[in-house]
Image (tube, rainbow, N blue to C red):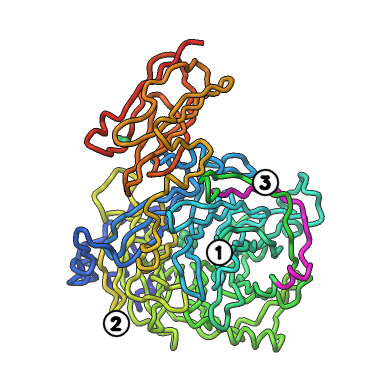
Amino acid sequence: METVINKFRKVAPKAALLVAVAAGAALQGCSGIEGADSASTATAVAGDAASQVYVAPGKHDELYTFMSGGFSGQVSVYGVPSGRQLKVIPVFSQNPENGYGYNEETKAMLNTSFGFVPWDDLHHPKLSRTDGMTDGRWLFVNANNTPRVARLDLKTFETAEILEIPNSAGNHCSPYPTNDNEYVLAGTRFSVPINVEGDGKYEDVNFDEYKDKFRGSISFIKVDKEHGDMELDFQILVPGFDYDLANGGKGPSSDWVFFTTYNTEQANTLKEIGASQNDKDFLAAINWKLAVKYAKEGKAKEMPAYYYHNKLDEKTHIAKSEVKKSVRILRPEDCPGLMYLIPVPKSPHGIDVDPTGEYMVVSGKLASVIPVHSFSKMLKTIENKDFIGNVGGIPILRYESVLQGEVKEPGLGPLHTEFDDKGNAYSSMFVSSEIVKWTLKDLQVKDRIPVYYSVGHLVIPGGDTKKPYGKYLIAMNKITKDRYLPTGPELAQSAQLIDISGDKMKLLLDFPTIGEPHYAQAIEASKIAPNSVKMYSLEENTHPQATKKESEARVERNGNEVHVYMTAIRSHLTPDNIEGINEGDEVYFHVTNLEQDWDVPHGFAVMGNNNAELLIMPGATQTLKWVPQRPGIFPMYCTDFCSALHQEMQGYIKVSPK
Ligand code: CUK
Ligand code: CUA
């Protein structure tokens, strides 16, 4: 550590260095940051920061930012530049606040081949694209732990669909939409035993068989042009490395997608990382268009697989699960020209392609430079067969032949890079806690700004498209330390808004985030706001248990199931005195919100119910299951302050002994 810091001292300004040392110390388990003096912050904050982030009451923000909630399993939505939190969209985790994953309508969303999985680790939101530009229609996100990809509908800000990924473990380099949303690609982090010839039954595999039997997979998820529905078309079986991150090409490289890999020596333990390791890992370049062509030509082989596909029915708004039993597999050895390996410094993390599609920037956490590879040189190297070997028949290209150049002494621990509209790149430095701005033309460092502390991803609105918006950068930091009032041992994670419109980066704002923000996507508000659904039409509600008139509200018994067809409208629930329920019954409250007035939801809760509440939007129906634990009188009420008589929106349920 000492020597690296000394080396770094030569190039870093003092403020960044202070933080670097502190963050480095923190990472090594020392007692924490004391050196984060406010003076270093003060110098980085723009003088007019307050006015730049001020959005007057009643005014709207310029941009939406969709942030991953990390281990909260959710997506959070922020307005930028204000940093105001607008919404949390539940995706892979149950959310008792609005009944997601608890109510009968959305439970099926969380079904997997492992059963009901109500939590996950969400890392990468990616907006859907049209002609290489984000179009604001859908947001794709990954579940890292139990491999899944979800699609969120940005008309309703709801999770519309969750697809489980077979032959994958740790779905980390995921999800990457191609430039016209033809496919969303997802790569496995951990390699696992995959036997294409097998019958899908359990096979006993030992750790020492890693090299022979462990493989990675890249999933090709086809996206319906009109509705966005996903479908697992096929997978590519790739060598047993760990696949970390990916990004698609643009312009000339549009047909390609690039994945960073580590553990290319294919060891089953990474404990001794560094000791006997290769000095390079690989950037895997895959021609996805060619893969699709090969798959269409019948080169993909069907193998047994077992996975779930859960979808919200567009009409009834009820999630349904479908079980899939097989998947088609493409093997690179059968598909010439499909895949190449480009050496990169070992243990790389982010791979980002510049707006022109010519440069692939690879950030290696342990590397002292940021290598920039050239797409046109890559094509030439392939054409000249300038290979230095192969892995399972996949050619390894000569590093020097593909390399455009290296960004020298960028800082410590480069992780991710995004781009502006003026030919600049911005890389996050985890260890030295800073954002470093450099030029694509001559790979020179132009500016650096400290962030607090240990930044992971960064995002520039449109910074991963062919035409970045280029006004702001948001750093998403892993460690918050002293930035906010202390809240005990667990602190909020933090985002920092930076103005990148001038030569010098200027810090504008800190704002706390939900869970651990990994990546984010930001987009002009005008691409989403006009299409946002205001209300569900009661008339078009096709939920089979909807009650559209108060006069039709009723209680029906079917064996030990009791169905309560309930309506909610300001300011009463109907029926509001429910009897005829016995201990041990399964009670289903189907509550329809009869309002047709924007922003008047009703909530619903029953005393002692160990499920969740319902939060029912106008025109919608939701169902709460309740199994009363004992006889008695149980109050129920609306939980959302909906009118002056909200408090009166209540009732009783009588449960009789068996
Ligand atoms: S990863 Cu979190 S900082 Cu999962 Cu994209 Cu790099
Ligand atoms: Cu309805 Cu409060």
Crowding at dot 2, Cα within 10 Å, few <14 / some 14-19 / many 20+, comes out as few
For the N terminus, the quadrant is bottom left
Q: Judge whether 317 appears above or below 139 on screen.
A: above
Q: Which residues are magenta?
A: 293-312
Tag on residue 565? none
> Where residue 503 is drawn, which disc sits there?
2
The residue mark sitting in front, 1 or 2, is 1
Residue occupying image coordinates x 47% and y 24%? 555
Label 3: which secondary element = strand
Element type where label 2 sits in the image: loop
- The type of residue carrying mark 2 is Asp
Camera-side residue of 71 and 162: 162
Q: Of tags 3 and 1, which is closer to the observer?
A: 1
| Residue under numbered circle 3 | 323
Q: CA distance from mark 3 to mark 1?
A: 24 Å
Residue 288, position in %: x, y? 65, 72
Crowd rating for badge 1 (residues with CA inside 10 Å; few <14, some 14–19, many 20+): few
Q: Is residue 618 above or below residue 236?
A: above
